[in-house]
Amino acid sequence: MRDDSARWDPPGPLSFASDALTLREVALPRQVTISGIGVLNRFADTLIGWPDIASTETYALSLRRDRVLYVGEPGLSSGYDPESGLGVTDMADGYRVLDLSGPGALEALRRGAELSLDRPSRSVLRRVFGLDLLLYRVGDGQSFRLHVERAFAQALAAHLRH
Amino acid sequence: MSGHRVENFGLIDRSRPLHFTFDGRRYQGFDGDTLASALLANGVRILGRSFKYHRPRGLWGAWSDDANAILSVKRAGTDLPNCPAATTYLEDGMVARAVNAWPSAAFDVKGGLDLFQRWLGAGFYYKTFIWPDWHLFEPAIRQMAGLGSVSESVLEDYISDQIHGACDVLVVGGGAAGLVAARAAAEAGRDVCLVDDQRVPGGGIYQRADIDGQSPADWVRAQTKAIEAAGGRVLNATTAFGVYDHGLIGLAETGLFGNAPRLIRMRAGRVILAMGALDRPITFPENDRPGVMSLFGAAELLARYGVMVGRKLAVVANHSLADGVARALGEAGAWIERIDPGDGPIAAFQGRRVTGLKQGSHSRVYDAVLTSGGLTPLVHLWRHAGGKLSWCDKRQAFLPGEAPQDMVAIGAANGTFDLDAALDEAKAAATGAPPPQGATTYAVALLWPEPGAKGRQWIDFQNDVTLKDIEVAARENYVSVEHLKRYTTLGMASDQGKTANMAGLAAMAAIQDRPLPEVGTTTFRPPFVPVPLELYRGPHRQQLWHPLKRLPLEVEHRGLGAALGEYGGWLRPAWYGTGAADAQIAAEVRTARGTAGLFDGSPLGKIEVMGPDAEAFLDFVYYNTVRTLKPGQIRYGFMLTEGGVVFDDGVLARLGSAHFLVSCSSSHADGVRVHLEAWRQDGNDPDRIFIHDATQAWATLTVTGPHARAIVSAVDLGIDFAASAFPHMAFRPGVWRGREARVARVSFSGDLSFEISVPASLAGELWGRLLEIGRSHGAEPIGLEAMSVMRAEKGYIIIGKDTDGETMPHDLGFAGPRFKKTTAFLGDRSLHNAKATGPGRKELVGLKSTGGRLATGAHVAKAGASEGYVTSSYDSPTLGAPIALGLVADGRSRLGETVEIRHLDQSMAAELCAPCVFDPEGKRLHA
């Protein structure tokens, strides 16, 4: 039983900017975890893997063979939908979303994970700095979007600021 | 040995003098020097002391094969121990001291230990100092042992950067073969990375007068330029220190002194090893004297640093490459005498440094003796990768044999010591072509240690292992090379056998009259050379070493003066306020019992299980029956391991016919998710069950206490909180700020409680509202410590604290499903075996002490043996008395019995009682 408050920095803004790197928090309207048979096919038009570029407002992040994180309104209610055979959970507050840009962006990510634009993956799930992230590209392809579990957002920002 | 500079040799910049001190004396070197080369150029002979006997040590090799000269170096406030002099580049203002020597390497007061050498042989510490007690001697021995001492100052900025890299072809070693291989691969369109551990690549090529009609320096520049022009990378001062799984190579990139090296985790499609070969010492009496050194080391000192190690040199070698090296040293101005060790046993003159040699009846005076007992290919990385070795009689060396996947060895590392052949091999390796076959011109005469020979003959210079030590080990049956290493310390410490092992293995082979390859080698493990521990740590330090999960309301809790602590991987309020912790916690308990407490329970697991088979799946995973649970109901239950041991407890809410919410314990949420996912995929149709962990999407705020209903009713959640409408163990959906809210009437405190879960981003508003309403009722925030006290008063357990690795549900008083549940469940069979049903099981009980608070962990003692222990213990503000829970053998059938509690030689009495000492009828819970 010990007061460790002083050993941990109070939470602060995640965003920062330096010459080589800019980290900016992004507000996405909805994030919905959807699981089920054929879910990848269902959202094939907007399915994003690594190192795909998300260029639309709504899109589905491929997590695994039976799971996506849908960014936007999927038109499905939460819970199990017997008609579609899908399980749906609102995760809008489960992840904080950050855009990393600047000339040092990829290098900064490589400090925490083995990443290459030349090595594609069907999934956007990555372990970076020991944290589970959803990672893909946005805009002109020079910026990276990171979804991080809410409770580890401070740790991710600290790693990138390091 | 009278080392001195020679004009027109070396890669150093003589226009840039650098000043430094060694053992208190000032010296000058040049940019490009190592500490070792600069000291030799200044005529310094003794650079260190050996580990055990404190014998004077001079330089053996010119690079990482030297284990004799180890220094503590200070510069600009940075103080680093154990810097190898031969691989530490000189910088202006360095203050160097020999480790393991006082007051200096030249005069070391512990040098007298050598007089006692006959009592300090291999394994002496296993045989002496036993009587009366080893611990009497241990402090003094430990004080004398070791090399450099870590500075007391903390190097705040000594932080290794870490990065991941990838390439098609990684070439390790920037000697001639490595350069040619890298160039050929790069020009063939491959993504090539060449790493070399020196600042200037080229390996030993500078010992030659020319190559392809160019000076070695021009030739090396041309190769590196061509590699880079073809898109390849050349990383100088970068050591490949280890090979790991799936083509991962650890690279340590060093910079200026005082800067931590950078770790590059390089994933290579293919690895070409061109690390070269090392010179082997020759074993003869007094062969450890300063001035006896490697022939190739001396040549390298001349070629790279313009340092001639002496003026009158003996060259003692047994192979065909020695003549050329000797000739080059002679042409640089040294007086050379070639001695054939095959002409008879040799011995160095005794003294603090070498002054001459005897061979038979002839004695000759020299100021340095350059020896070479043959070349040993550097196969460390090859072995890290799982490559085999094969013995070559012609070269008297272990060579790379059966190759590991995607790795090839070339040049001297492959036993190809002829330059032209090595370059052909390099070109073939670059394109994946079969290696050219050709006869080697290298010839070496047998020259291994001779057991029984007279005099003290050193095998391992750093660790003071002599030929006699090997003989002792063999006599005492430490004949396995791994045992030999541990018994004698042969090949330990920073050298790791680079110079010592071959002679040691050969000696053991000779003693046993076995072929050397039968004796084998010890295991090669990373790192190839010593690297700072910081390299592995990198940015994973302080708050980033093991980052805690942070609550959505941390700012609000800090604003309320919360004392935060780690609980199950989360940073959570332990208590609030600045007073003494015990008093604050007790006040919080009294507030919660008197009116209500407001508690942040956000870390509680919130795992959704959905799908047509969700009910059957959970019925199998839970100890309790799930299929009878109706939508809107909640049930407390256990998950068990296959062994029947309680894995987690928590509540399960049924949100719909095929939709469940698993609210597991806070610290086990990640583990429970993995547990559920594992069983989903094992024996179930994974397309009919879906598991979503939404723990971090929701914040859970608990209101607990007699005023809880009044408080939550005042929050506009759109729920009827009347007791009849919302009974204990029920779940109701609501709305908060236009979004879904989930309210569960469950209790961990034993009082009327409501857990309100809202989207995490809306938690701040709800917390503020609860504080506002709650304070009007006298409620206040409470921390986890107060909640822990209250749950113990009620007899509620915390998994992992009040249970251990053997606790089964019936030990906790939950025996029903074990006999009554009709469907199969996880752990069922294990609950019926002899151990599970036998006597003596440790069962959960309460402990009532009359002598004060019991110590958590204290043993319940009987006849000197333990029959259980205290798992939780508090001073109960509610009861005004100490309370405790414990696991005690057959405890539940012994209620009322007085037992002895022992802790740290103190004894107390306690009465076994029921775990629940607060509201046993449950009136407050069901209010």
Image: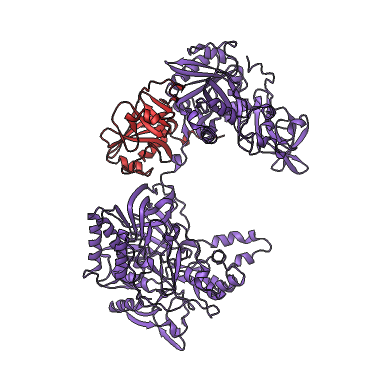
Name the spot of residue B670 as percent of width and height, x first: 51, 34
Query: Which image quadrant is residue B94 in?
Result: bottom left
- The image quadrant where one finds the C terminus of chain B is top right
Counting from the top left corner in percent of width and height, residue B183 is at 26, 59
> Where is residue B381 drawn, in percent x and y?
42, 59
Q: Is residue A1 above or below residue B601?
A: below
B332 to the left or right of B593: left
Q: Colour of chain A?
A: red
Number of labels in the image equals 0
The N terminus of chain B is located in which quarter?
A: bottom left
- Quarter of the figure with residue B375: bottom left
Where residue B545 appears, x then y in whole percent?
46, 42
- Can residue B586 be seen in this snapshot? no
- Quadrant of the image occupied by residue A24: top left
Q: Is residue B858 left or right of residue B191?
A: right
Q: Colour of chain B?
A: purple
Residue at the location (27% across, 36% down)? A141
Q: Nearer the viewer, residue B670 or B469?
A: B670
In the image: residue B866, left or right of residue B479: right
Nearer to the camera, B444 or B294: B444
Residue reaching furthest to the left: B213
Report whether residue A126 is seen.
Answer: yes
In the depicted structure, whether residue A54 falls above or below residue B920? below
